[in-house]
Image (tube, rainbow, N blue to C red):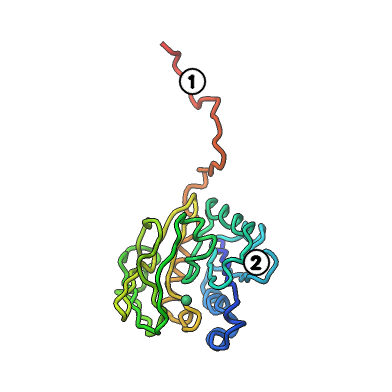
Amino acid sequence: MNPINLTIFNEFVHERKNEAVQKVYPNGMHEAIAAHMRLQPGISVRCATLDMPEHGLNEDVLAATDVLIWWGHMAHDTVADAVVEKVHARVLDGMGLIVLHSGHMSKIFRKLMGTSCSLCWREAGERERLWIVNPSHPVSQGLGPFIELPHAEMYGEFFDIPDPDELLFISWFEGGDVFRSGATWHRGKGKVLYFRPGHETYPIFYNPDILQVLVNAVRWAPFSGSPNVTTITACPQITEPLEPLRPAT
Ligand code: ZN
């Protein structure tokens, strides 16, 4: 079987500006995720960062990517629109996209959702429980009944997203808030997952349950439909009928 080609995009800005973040992720969040993914059979890993030409996401890379993970926060605005367009087109053509944490405000996620994707938040190191509300989903396998994070940034409702195709996780926070923490959508031939955890000052991407979700998601996200159904990007007129038409009476 061909490996799943995974590309992990991280803006990689906090880790180079903030000492506290550097302590948790000395090589960047993308490398913490990549290190675990490289241990998984059948997953081939590449990393991309904002400072690379075309953010490491040129046409060849995108064409060879089955699943793209996206982490961004303070540099959303500096992601080139041309790259966003190319990523968007690849999602419609079947590339899986996993958007993490503050990626909810990324250009690509907002473009795919068509809503503001805003939410409310509080940084107080609260305990978080992600309740699994769709135990039969491939992304939930090997987990449950909930994932507990001792310290997390709170994200609260209202989360301005379109109704998800599937809701996978609902978070409860110590301070009383709740949040739709895992949700999926189909866009064209592509699958999109939003997964909430991943604040840069906490060691979230070393947590075995969080890594399990990500591995499950990378195995779930590639296009798995019929290769015989082609995506129609224009609106062609079908001049020749497939079968002879009956004469008009
Ligand atoms: Zn955060």
Mark 1 neighbour density, 10 Å: few (under 14) some (14–19) many (20 or more) = few
- Where does label 1 land, which residue? 244
User: In front here: 12 or 208?
Assistant: 12
Please, what is the three-letter code of the amino acid marked with disc 2?
His
Q: Secondary structure at mark 2?
A: helix
Task: Please name the residue shown 46% across and 83% down the image.
Answer: 202
Q: Quadrant of residue 137?
A: bottom left
User: In front here: 136 or 3?
Assistant: 136
* Quadrant of image for the C terminus: top left
Q: Outermost residue toward the right?
A: 53
Cβ of mark 2 under 8 Å from ligand 1: the answer is no
Q: Is residue 175 left or right of residue 77?
A: left
Task: Please name the residue shown 62% across and 67% down the image.
Answer: 78
Q: Is residue 16 left or right of residue 121?
A: right
Checking the image for residue 55, the label placed there is: 2
Q: Quadrant of residue 52?
A: bottom right
Precedes in sequence: disc 1 or disc 2: 2
Q: Secondary structure at mark 1?
A: loop
Image spot of residue 7 (x, y percent):
58, 67
Inter-mark Cα distance, 1 to 2: 51 Å
Image spot of residue 81 (x, y percent):
62, 58
Q: Tags 1 and 2 in contact by the CB under 8 Å rule? A: no
Q: Is residue 196 left or right of residue 227?
A: left
Mark 2 neighbour density, 10 Å: few (under 14) some (14–19) many (20 or more) = some
Please, what is the three-letter code of the amino acid marked with disc 1?
Pro
* Quadrant of image for the N terminus: bottom right
Image spot of residue 103 (x, y percent):
50, 68
